[in-house]
Amino acid sequence: MINGQLDHSWVKLAVTQLIESTSTPNTEYKIMANILSHTDGGLLTKDNCALAFIDLQPQMSFGVASGIDRQLLVNNVLMLAKGAKEFGVPTIITTVETESFSGPTWPQLLDVFPDHAPIERTGMNSWDTQAFRDAVKATGKKNIILSGLWTEVCITWPTLNMLAEGYNIYVVDDACAGTSTASHEAALSRMVQAGAVRMTTVATVLEFQRDWVDKTHYSALMDIFREHGGGYGVGIEYAYTMVHKAPPARRVLT
């Protein structure tokens, strides 16, 4: 308010800045200002990232109440795990208080990585454990994908610490879960505000593939999606059998 009248100068300034930002030759660079370093123009590739599964254990699973069905959570984790393995993405598994409280890592996940020995911890924050820090650093990657339980503690805390140390963190939203919807969403907001990126399982695995002209992993990827991809997988099965006249993806169980 100036001399009894509203001061609209700030509005004029904002409009001027908006016009300049959308009409100068450098518009592309202004828009791209938040693209993370160590990425392929903002994208992950199979060669520029690593994956960590944190505390996917029975006791932690009992506490999941953030809205995702537990079986869907298991399904998504396995899709992510199989996708990462197929594309050779370095993968770490860590657990907390296995013997005294949480129980062992889900056997389905260990079946995907039978040679992985989970890094055991006493603390809730993986980044506080030297062996986990060493494992992350040994991958040589600056883009770290996270999946695990619970979102608000064992995912959020290492995320904040790793961001502070210069890592790019990608949290796979539907391969994590919390103790309530509020805690899961609040944790995701906290991480994003600090600089983390929210992802989803199917999109993450597809980012590894990126171009369908590359057939190196095509058949294996289609098998992963047919087993774990829900409606997407059903659509793939339909295209295989009805359009391309391929045999159904059946397995005889003994």
Image: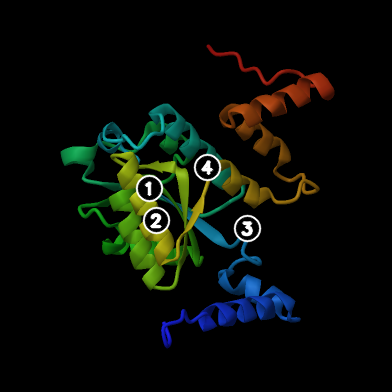
Which is more toward the observer, 116 or 148?
148
Q: Quadrant of residue 134?
A: bottom left
* Disc on res. 185: 1
Q: CA distance from mark 4 to mark 3?
A: 14 Å
Circle nearer the N terminus (1, 3): 3
Return the residue at label 4. 80
Residue at position x 37%, y 48% from top? 185
Other-residue count near label 1 (Cα within 10 Å), few / some / many at <14 / 14–19 / ≥20: some
Q: Are marks 4 and 3 in contact (CB under 8 Å)?
A: no
Q: CA distance from mark 4 to mark 1?
A: 21 Å
Circle nearer the N terminus (4, 1): 4
Question: Residue most toward the front?
Answer: 4
Return the residue at label 2. 189
Residue 117: x percent and y percent?
36, 47
Identify the secondary structure beneath mark 4. Answer: helix
Residue 117 seen from this side: no
Which amino acid is tagged 3?
A: Thr
Which amino acid is tagged 1?
A: Glu
Q: Is residue 253 left or right of residue 92?
A: right
Q: Are marks 2 and 1 in contact (CB under 8 Å)?
A: yes
Question: Residue most toward the top?
Answer: 254
Q: Is residue 70 left or right of residue 86?
A: left
**Vertical placement of residue 238 versus 188, above or below:** above
Circle nearer the N terminus (2, 4): 4
Residue at position x 56%, y 69% from top? 36
Circle nearer the N terminus (3, 2): 3
